[in-house]
Amino acid sequence: MKLRFLIPLVAFIALVGLLFVGLSLDPREIPSPLIGKEAPGFDLPELRNEEVRFAREDMLGKPALLNVWASWCVTCRQEHPMLAELRRAGVPIYGLNYKDTRSDALRFLGQFGDPYDAIGFDESGLVGIDYGVYATPETFLIDSNGKIRFKHIGMITPEVIETRILPLYRQLEAET
Amino acid sequence: MRPWNYLQLPLFVAAIALLMPMTAAAGPTAPPSEPMTFDSELDEQRYQKLIRELRCTVCQNQNLIESNAPLANDLRRQIALMINDGSDTDEIVDYMVARYGDFVLFRPPMKGITYLLWFGPVAMLLIGLGTLGTILWRRRTQVGSEPLSTDEEERLRSLLGDGGHDKT
């Protein structure tokens, strides 16, 4: 009756495997339903210049990153040098300043640098809702036609840049 | 102390623990902050129902009514706006799912990817019951309770010594 002892053992190992996989998942990583869809439209005042408007259409023509950030977001502060890095690699970076005040946001840029090509000032957070934002920082990779191809939730790390963002960006760049 | 005394405390704690979720389930009846105004009683009810069924995506185990996160606040305001604009309940749910995915629903839709979620527990229960049933069935067939034969009864009596009487 070897099987009698084997079955519980196999079941136990299967359960441990299941729990192990479960533990390694990040519950904050909610798959975005927006991947592969058109980036939602918006038309916002520019953060740095009230008179200028920044709209979704301004991002088109070249693949680009849209980074959702706020001065009150501590992780954004840590992430900030990574954006400058991407800018140096030639990636256009747009910002969505989410539920912030203009003065705080400008002070943040003064302190930590400003890698953005343009920044939409989303004071009410309504554009954030359209993009399904729930945890800043969030970063979208949008192709030249305005389709969302990739979303990263949380801080961009050098690893994310090397393994996800830059390869996909180069591929999108080649497509256009 | 009698064993009962040792049991009293754990039982008391267990009883409290069982009661707790019930009191929590009664929960708040209105969002903690901003009061929303609606045109009709029906709209108000739809609002209350929606903010109980939609998840706050930041604080993942709370629904919109329980959460004080700024995002939950914004989403409640958005739902109230849409209700007052005349959107029906399905439209609002679709609006949220389009932005945050099925995850925003506390009752996920039944489709291929969620079958395991919906039927997993029942399947596990059936497997468990099946296993238990098999084991019990086997045990019953293994341990027969046939009456002793005359020879065996004789032998038993001799082993017990004095004809089966208790020593006193």
Image (cartoon, coloured by chain):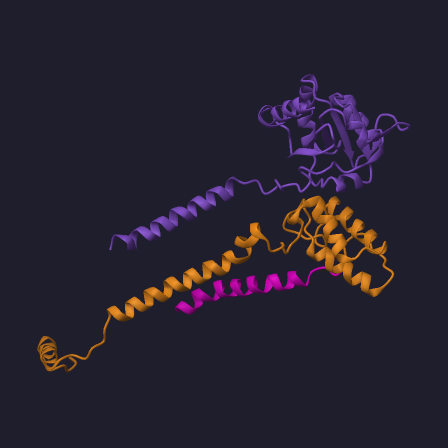
Chain colours: A purple, B orange
The correct choice, above or below, for A106 with respect to B102 in the image is above
Q: Nearer the viewer, residue A137 or A52?
A: A52
Task: Name which residue lies at 52% across and 53% down.
Answer: B116
* Quadrant, the C terminus of chain B: bottom left
The image position of residue B114, as x and y in percent, is 57, 52
The correct choice, above or below, for A60 with respect to B139 in the image is above
Looking at the image, the residue that sits furthest to the right is A51
Position of residue B35 in the picture relative to residue B24 (left or right)? right
Task: Name which residue lies at 81% across and 64% down.
Answer: B42
Q: Nearer the viewer, residue B161 or A1?
A: A1
Does the stretch in magenta take in B49?
A: no
The image position of residue B22, as x and y in percent, is 62, 64
Position of residue A38 in the picture relative to residue B115 (left or right)? right
Query: Which secondary structure type mostly characterizes the magenta part of the structure?
Result: helix
* Quadrant, the N terminus of chain B: bottom left
Question: Quick check: can you spot residue B137?
Answer: yes
Question: Quick check: can you spot residue B30?
Answer: no
Q: To which quarter of the image does residue A4 belong?
A: bottom left
Q: Nearer the viewer, residue B117 or B159?
A: B117
The image position of residue A75, as x and y in percent, is 67, 31
Q: How many marks?
A: 0
The image position of residue B162, as x and y in percent, is 10, 81
The correct choice, above or below, for B70 with respect to A122 in the image is below
Looking at the image, the residue that sits furthest to the top is A88
From which residue to which does the magenta span run? Answer: B1-29
Q: To which quarter of the image does residue A96 belong?
A: top right
Q: Nearer the viewer, residue B39 or B154?
A: B39
Task: Name which residue lies at 84% across and 25% down.
Answer: A48
Position of residue A85 in the picture relative to residue B7 (left or right)? right
